[in-house]
């Protein structure tokens, strides 16, 4: 019997050590997921805590038809969305038509020094509505009709917010590229002087 299956069965029997093991195995990755949706660490911690409460309450519904981590991620995403919907101004953050004709192309050319953390920071700085939809579409892999259903918005709103997120990220990447070029030019001048 796989170790993960044994751990789940022990959790179902209220084995505190197995519950701790499950938490320790997945909490780091799931916290990163929560942080992508929530604006601050405290809110992400609340989402993570609420998610694990749901996990332990409903672990008996896990059917082993997908990886456990995927099931856990879905719980965290849904818990984060529920928390976002409770915030004042949530529905206003999804309003507006931001369709942009150009496609977003990121081929890493000129962004060699852009780290994963810097990119995640840029995504985290997006306005709440488009950040949420960008995460759901580009990172989690949901389709626009699924996002529309999850957030109780139109499919057009989902596409519009995603388009806005891409445009804002393009602007942020352009600023970063300019910063990198200026830094390189400055270093080159220093090398030439010496």
Image (tube, rainbow, N blue to C red):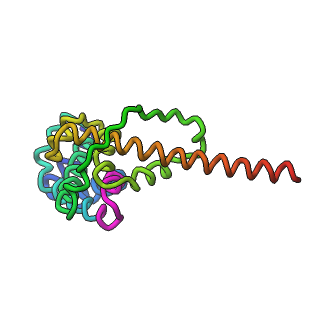
Residue at (29% x, 36% y) in the render: 141
Residue at (14% x, 52% y) in the render: 12
Chief SS of the magenta region = helix
Q: Position of residue 24 (x, y in %)?
A: 33, 57
Indicate whether 90 appears above or below 71.
below
Indicate whether 43 appears above or below 144.
below
- Of 76 and 6, nearer the camera is 76
The span shown in magenta is 32-45
**Most distant residue in the bottom direction:** 42
Inspect this view and state whether residue 3 appears.
Answer: no
On the image, which quarter does residue 2 sit in?
top left
Residue at (36% x, 51% y) in the render: 29
- Of 144 and 27, nearer the camera is 144
**Most distant residue in the right direction:** 194
Residue at (22% x, 42% y) in the render: 157
Q: Position of residue 191 (x, y in %)?
A: 83, 50
User: Can residue 101 be found in the magenta stretch?
Assistant: no
Marker count (numbered): 0
Is 169 displayed left or right of 148 in the figure? right
Inspect this view and state whether residue 68 appears.
Answer: yes
User: Can residue 35 be found in the magenta stretch?
Assistant: yes
Q: Position of residue 180 (x, y in %)?
A: 63, 48
Indicate whether 98 appears above or below 50.
above
Is 34 displayed left or right of 104 in the figure? left
On the image, which quarter does residue 87 sit in?
bottom left
Indicate whether 99 appears above or below 124.
above
- Of 100 and 144, nearer the camera is 100
Is 114 displayed left or right of 185 in the figure? left
**Quarter of the figure that contains the N terminus:** top left
Q: Position of residue 107 (x, y in %)?
A: 52, 33
- Of 55 and 13, nearer the camera is 55
């Amino acid at each position: 019997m796989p170790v993960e299956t044994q751990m789940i069965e022990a959790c179902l029997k209220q084995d505190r050590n197995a519950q701790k093991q499950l938490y320790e195995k997945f909490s780091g990755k799931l916290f990163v997921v929560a942080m992508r949706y929530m604006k601050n660490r405290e809110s992400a911690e609340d989402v993570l805590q609420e998610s694990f409460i749901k996990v332990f309450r409903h672990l008996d519904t896990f059917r082993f038809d997908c990886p456990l981590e995927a099931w856990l991620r879905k719980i965290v995403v849904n818990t984060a969305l529920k928390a976002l919907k409770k915030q004042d101004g949530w529905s206003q953050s999804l309003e507006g038509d931001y369709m942009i004709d150009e496609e977003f192309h990121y081929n890493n050319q000129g962004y060699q020094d852009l780290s994963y953390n810097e990119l995640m920071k840029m995504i985290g700085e997006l306005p709440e509505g488009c950040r949420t939809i960008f995460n759901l579409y580009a990172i989690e892999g949901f389709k626009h009709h699924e996002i529309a259903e999850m957030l109780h918005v139109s499919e057009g709103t989902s596409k519009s917010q995603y388009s806005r997120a891409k445009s804002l990220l393009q602007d942020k990447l352009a600023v970063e590229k300019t910063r990198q070029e200026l830094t390189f030019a400055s270093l080159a001048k220093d090398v030439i002087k010496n």
